[in-house]
Amino acid sequence: MKAQRLGHRIGFVSTRFAGTDGVSLESAKWAQVLWDHRHQSFWYAGQLDRDPETSMLVTHAYFNTPDNEWINERIFGPRTRAPEVTRIIYALSEHLKRTLYDFTRKFDIEILCVQNALTIPMNIPLGIALTNFIAETGFPTIAHHHDFYWERDRFSVNAAGDMLEMAFPPRLPSIQHVTINSAAQQDLSWRKGVSSILVPNVLNFENPPPEPDDYSQCLRGDLGLSDDDVIFLQPTRVVPRKGIEHSISLVAALRDPRCKLIVSHASGDEGDTYRQALREMAEHRGVDLRFIGDRVGEIRTLNAKGEKIYTLADAYSQADFITYPSLYEGFGNALLEAFYFRKPVLVNRYSIYITDIEPKGAKVIPMDGILTSEVVSQVQKAIQDERYREEMVDHNYEVGKAFFSYSVLRRKLRAIITNFTGADNL
C-alpha cells in the first residue's frame, strides 16, 4: 500500500510563538488544520515554545530585546530619527534577513506564513527583513494580519513613516494577505491598495470541550471560593481597552455577596497602573475582585510553591458568567470561548462584534458603553433562569459551529494554499 504523500512544508514566522496571546493561539490552530492534511509546520521566532526539532529561535526577532526597545523609544513619539537609529535598524534587519535565508534552507520551506510580523511594528527590523527577503526571493507568503499599526494610538506619532509604508504590510506580488475582520479588510484595501482574504478566528466547535474533571473542580477551593459562589470570569489581559471597570460595576450592581469577579490573565507589557486602579475601584464598590494570572497557565502543572496551575479551559469550566466589556477588539477570542464553553456572556458592543459577529445571530447580553439597569436585570435572569440560560448558550454554540469553526478555517486555507500550488490538496 502506497504511503500518503506529505503536503507542503510551511514556515511560520513571528516575533513570538509562546504563551496564550492571540497570535500564538491562532497560529497553532492553523498548524493543526494544516497537519490534518499532511502539511508540515516549522517555526521561526524570538520566543518559542514549539518543538525544538522543527523550530529556529532567533533572539533578535523578539520585540522585547534591549536593542528593539531602544529602537522603539526613539521612533514612536518623536517625529524625526537620528541617523544612528536608521543605521541600527537596517543592520539588525540584515542580520535577521540572513537568518530567514537560513530558516528556509534548513527546513526546506515551501510557503511562509508570517503571523502579524508584517502588521504591527513591534519589531521594525524584522518587518524590513521579511519584506526584503520576500522581495529578493519571490517567496510564496501568507501574511496573516491580526492588528494593524493604524489601529493603535501608541503608533500614531512616529519617526518611521517610510518604514511603516514599506513593510507594514508590504505590497509584493508573492504575498497573499489575510485579515481577521471586515473592517481590517476594508482598511487594508483603502490604505495599501491590496486585497485580502477574510479568515475569522476560530475554535474547534466540531469537538465540544470535555466535562469538568476532578482537577478543574479544585479551582474554586484553591481560590478560596465555595460551591455557592457565582463566578464572573473576565478572561482577558488587564489592559484599559478591556473595560474591566464595567465588570466591577456589574458585580457591584448585582448586590449579591456570592458574586465574585476573577480575572484570568496578567497585565502583560502595558504596566500595572490600570490593575491598581481596578483594585481601588473594587474595594470602593465592595466587589470581591481576584487576579489569578499567576494560577492560570498553558498546561496543568505545579508552581514553585507546589500549588496547582490551571488552564484557561479549567477557569471557563468553573465560571458561571463571562464578562467581556471590551472597548475595542481585533476580533474577540474570549467571546468565541464563551460560546464554546457554553457560558452566558456580557458584551460591550465593540465595532467588530457589531459588523462580524452580531449579524450571525449570537445571543448575548449587550451593552452600549454604559451599564444600564436593563443590562443588570438581563444578567440576573441569565444567572437565575436555567432554561433561559441553556437556550442562550446552546444557540451560541451552534452559531460558533456554523461560522467560527475549524471547518471554516479548513475551507479558507484550502483556497489560499491552492492559489500558490494550483492543487486542491487541503
Image: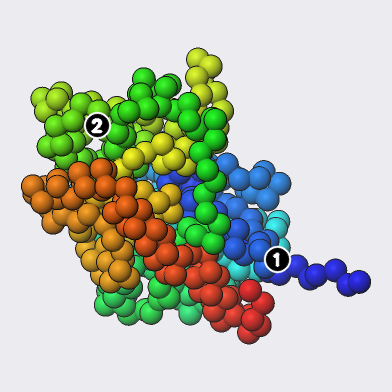
Residue 402, quarter of the rendered image: bottom left
- Left or right: residue 158 compared with residue 264: left
Q: Is residue 8 above or below residue 346?
A: below
Question: Is residue 175 among what the camera can see?
Answer: no
Residue at image point 67% right, 68% down: 37
Position of the N terminus by quadrant: bottom right
| Residue 334 screen position, x and y as percent | 36, 50
Image location (x, y in percent) of residue 178: 43, 70
Earlier-in-chain disc, 1 versus 2? 1
| Residue 59 as seen in the image, left or right of residue 188 | right
Q: In this view, does 19 lie above or below 351?
A: above
Is residue 354 in view from this perspective?
yes
The one nearer the camera, 240 or 411, is: 411
The disc placed on residue 419 is none
Q: Position of residue 316 (x, y in %)?
A: 41, 41
Which residue appears at 42% of the width and 22% of the height? Answer: 221
Residue at 59 percent of width and 80 percent of height: 418
Which residue is drawn at the image coordinates 12% and 37% (left, top)?
A: 253
Please tell me in which quadrant of the rendered image residue 363 appears. Answer: bottom left
Name the residue nearer the viewer: 100 or 287: 287
Please state which of residues 389 and 376 is positioned toward the viewer in this rendering.
389
Badge 1 amino acid: Arg
Labels 1, 2: front one: 2
Secondary structure beneath dot 1 equals loop
Instruction: Give residue 259's mark.
Output: 2
95 is higher (above) or lower (below) than 206: above
Q: Residue furthest bottom?
A: 422
Could you say whether the residue bearing mark 2 is in a helix, strand or loop?
A: strand
Vertically, is 4 above or below 278? below
Q: Residue 10, located in which quarter of the rendered image?
A: bottom right
The residue at which mark 1 appears reads as: 38
* Outermost residue, top side: 305
